[in-house]
Amino acid sequence: MHRHRTPLRGIKATPRPKPNDPNYTDVNYAYAGRPGRIHEVVEIGGRQLAKVGFDDRKIVYYLLEDVELDDRGDRRTFHDAADA
């Protein structure tokens, strides 16, 4: 069972996974340290996963605890862009 939570939608998010964490793949590490935006937070099995969208329109999931959030500035996702 999973639940969706969207109060963080659009907040700037920079994933910072721990090195060699078995919860992550090469794709996760390729986007680590790159700023993106939260699309939603999903809770699965009691763990909160942040669905992070990047400017190249790639979506990557991270444990919410491994994402640095910055709620300054505008809230948006790539879906909000004029050319979306």
Image (tube, rainbow, N blue to C red):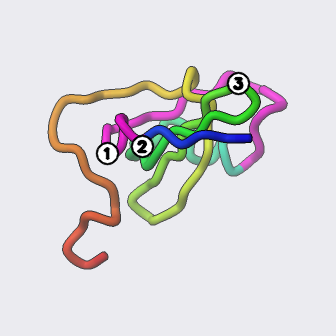
Q: Is disc 2 placed on a helix, strand or loop?
A: strand
Q: Which residue is mark 1?
A: 10
Question: Marks 1 and 3: CB-CB under 8 Å?
Answer: no
Task: Work out whether mark 2 precedes mark 1 in sequence or the reverse, and give the earlier one.
Answer: 1
Q: Quadrant of residue 46?
A: top right
Task: Work out whether mark 1 precedes mark 3 in sequence or the reverse, and give the earlier one.
Answer: 1
> Which is nearer the eye, 48 or 13?
48
Image point (46%, 53%), residue name: 53
Q: Which residue is mark 3?
A: 46
Question: Marks 3 and 2: CB-CB under 8 Å?
Answer: no
Question: Marks 2 and 1: CB-CB under 8 Å?
Answer: yes
Label 3 crowd (10 A; few <14 / some 14-19 / many >=20): few
> Which is nearer the eye, 48 or 82?
48
Q: Quadrant of residue 28?
A: top right
**Residue 38 numbered tag:** 2
Label 2 crowd (10 A; few <14 / some 14-19 / many >=20): many
Screen quadrant of the C terminus: bottom left
Screen quadrant of the N terminus: top right
Q: Which residues are magenta?
A: 6-26
Q: Is disc 1 placed on a helix, strand or loop?
A: loop
